[in-house]
Image: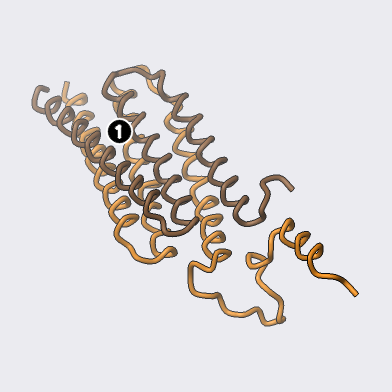
Amino acid sequence: MTYEIIALYAVSFCLIVGAIFTLVGAIGLLKFNDSMTRLHAPTKVGTVGVGALLLASIIYNGVFGEGAIQELLIMGFLFVTAPISANFIAKVNMHRRACDAPPALPTGEEWATFDLPATDNALLEDTIPSN
Amino acid sequence: MSAATDLMNYALTGAFIVVGLCQLMAMVRVVIGPGTGDRILALDTMVVNAIGLIVLMGLAQGTRIYFEASLIIAMLGFVSTVAYARFVLRGDIIE
C-alpha cells in the first residue's frame, strides 16, 4: 500500500519534471534569435523532457502492470540519435551561412561543410568552359 | 491512495496540455523559419514531442500497445531528419 503511494508520487514528479523541461525547450526554440542559439534549446526536450515522461511510464508499468522494456529501448534510441541529428543541423546552418564563420583552417583548405554539392559541381563544370 | 491518484491525474492532464502547447510552438517555428536549419530543427522537435504525447496517452489509458508505435516514430524521425539535412548539404540523399 505504502509502496504504491510512493510510486504514484514518483510518477507525478516525473510527469511534472518532463512537462517543465519540454516547455522550457519549446520556449527557447521560439524565443531565441540566432540559428545556432536555437539549436541548443530543444536538446532539453529530447533528453530530460521525454526521458522523464518515459521514466514515469516505466515506474507506472513496473508497479501496476507487468513491466515494460520498450520504454528503455525508446530512451536509448533517442539518447543515441539526438547528438547525431543536432550535428547534422549544425552542419546545415554552417552550409547555409546562417551563423558566424568558423576560423580558417591552418592548411589553407576549405571546411568540408562549405563544399558545393556534387550536383552543383557538375553544373559548374558544364557551364564553365575548360581550356 | 486517493490523494496520490488525484495528484497523478492532475499531473497527467497538465503534462498533456503542456506538451500539446509545445507541439504548437514548434509548429509556429516551422512556419516562421527563417532558414532551412530552423525548420529541420523544429520538425525534429515535433517528432520528439509526438513521442512524448504517445507515451502520455499510453499512461492515461493504461495500455502498452502504443510503445511500438512510438519506437517506430523515433526511428522514422531520426532517419527523416538526417535525410533532410543530407539533402541540403549534398544536394542528394544517397550519392
The colour applied to the residues of chain A in this rendering is orange
Q: What's the image's color scheme?
A: by chain
Question: In the rendered view of the protein, which quadrant contains the N terminus of chain B?
Answer: top left
Q: Quadrant of residue A119?
A: bottom right
Horizontal and vertical percent position of residue B55: 35, 30
Q: Residues within 10 Å of mark 1 (few under 14, many from 20)?
A: many
**Residue toward you, B77 or A72:** B77
Q: Quadrant of residue B19?
A: top left
**Tag 1: residue type?**
Ala
Horizontal and vertical percent position of residue A63: 29, 23
Q: Quadrant of residue A95?
A: bottom right
Q: Residue at x 50, y 39 (%)?
A: B77
The colour applied to the residues of chain B in this rendering is brown
**Residue labelled with disc 1:** A56
Count of numbered marks: 1
**Residue toward you, B80 or B75:** B80
Reply above or below: A30 against B70. below
Horizontal and vertical percent position of residue B17: 22, 36
Q: Secondary structure at mark 1?
A: helix
Image check: B13 left or right of A95? Answer: left
Q: Chain of mark 1?
A: A
Reply above or below: B54 against B43. above
